[in-house]
Amino acid sequence: MASDLKREQAPTVAIFPWGDVVEEFLDPIGLTLEDFVERMTGGWLFGYVAALQSAGWRAVIVCASEQVAAPRRLVHRETGAAVWAVPGRRAEYPYSSRRSLTQWLRTPWGGFARVLREERCTGLLAQEYEYARFDALALLAMAMRLPIFATFQAGDVTLSPLECRVRPWTLRRSRGLVVASAQERSRLAATYGRLRLRIGDIPNPIDGEEWRAGSKSEARAELGLPQDSFIAISHGRIDIRRKGLDVLIEAWLRFSAVRRDACLLLIGSGQDREEFARLLASRGASGVTWHSAYVTDRPLMRRWLSASDAYVITSRVEGMPVAPLEAMACGLPVVSTRAKGLPDIFADGEQSGGILVRCDDAEGVACALERLAASAGLRETLGGAARARIEARFSLSAVGRALADFMQPSGVEASMRSGGGASS
């Protein structure tokens, strides 16, 4: 009875992850729907869930799935959040107006509406707004008289002429966009300035209490890594173009030509794993160890980070990735490109714990790695700054309060009456 009362009273937001079906995200990393609820943790999605829970809100994850024949309610093991899978199909066509139309028509309207009613949701939050599913959700929200919000996680391209015509209409019906990237906020102003969108500058969260480094020497001993070598690490999805993995390997070739005893740890899997294996074999990069798996074991991931001296991310496309936040929380200095969202993490550059270089600048990445390899003092200074940046800006409680304030009905209506604008 008490749990039912809490469920009725707590504001409840339905979070819709990207994808026509959840398998578009899960298949490339080798996970199932059951893995999603039993093993997956962290990332922006479960970070949002935990952050909202810390502010007294309920978060319900809603997705379409090819693997269910009827709506199915699961429970996420770590957070206790409801995870609904409703029957759905993905669109087959290349990105075009025909695909966009198919995505809208294949939206499981009835299944989504059932979940929203059954969970007594007070609002919707969609991953990405430059996406056909957002348009469909905006229509559903309007029909059910619920507010809809969206969060930017790297989707910044309108994919078809038909979407170009529809998107201003659906954006106008959004109650707010959560956009942590200054570059993306500038693009929105240039593209949709006349809409006077309400935009919140709210970062992705991380549990800084959980992500703390252990003993470096013990971690290296446990993992069989050399005690005296400089070790850099990078983890995440194996997507060569978006993650700039070709740039990372080129940078490592230049760096390791001088630092022959250095090690690069790569941890992750994804749709480009076979192509990436060929790239590694063809370039003959020395000192590179790749663990081709999507790691859901957080204690193991913390050991890898604890064993390392520096983190490196060479992305071309980003929203606000959580992987470097995990490294920063573990006290690692970061070498990072200036892809969208990354400069916002390191707003004060090296005083925020990061050495920033241009995208596609392999030489710049190599030089930054050399600076860190040559100076334990610099690594300690930047690592301490990185940890302080996490505590000040990215904690679950701080992000949870900001999200709750942004999505509170009273705050939304006050902002709309004042003509919108950015929230910080």
Image: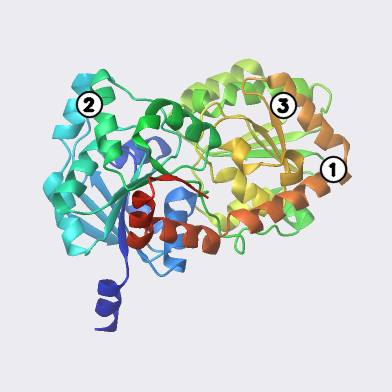
Q: Nearer the viewer, mark 2 or mark 3?
A: 2
| Amino acid type indicated by mark 2 | Ser
Residue under label 1, please give it.
Answer: 378
Q: Earlier in the sequence, mark 1 or mark 3?
A: 3
Q: Residues within 10 Å of mark 3 (few under 14, many from 20)?
A: many
Cα distance, mark 2 to mark 3? 38 Å
Q: Is residue 270 above or below residue 218?
A: above
Q: Which mark is residue 100?
A: 2
Q: Residues within 10 Å of mark 1 (few under 14, many from 20)?
A: some
| Amino acid type indicated by mark 3 | Val
Q: Secondary structure at mark 3?
A: helix
Q: Earlier in the sequence, mark 1 or mark 2?
A: 2
Residue 81 appears in the picture as rendered: no
Q: Residues within 10 Å of mark 2 (few under 14, many from 20)?
A: many
| Amino acid type indicated by mark 1 | Leu
In the image, residue 299 lies at what x, y percent?
Answer: 59, 58
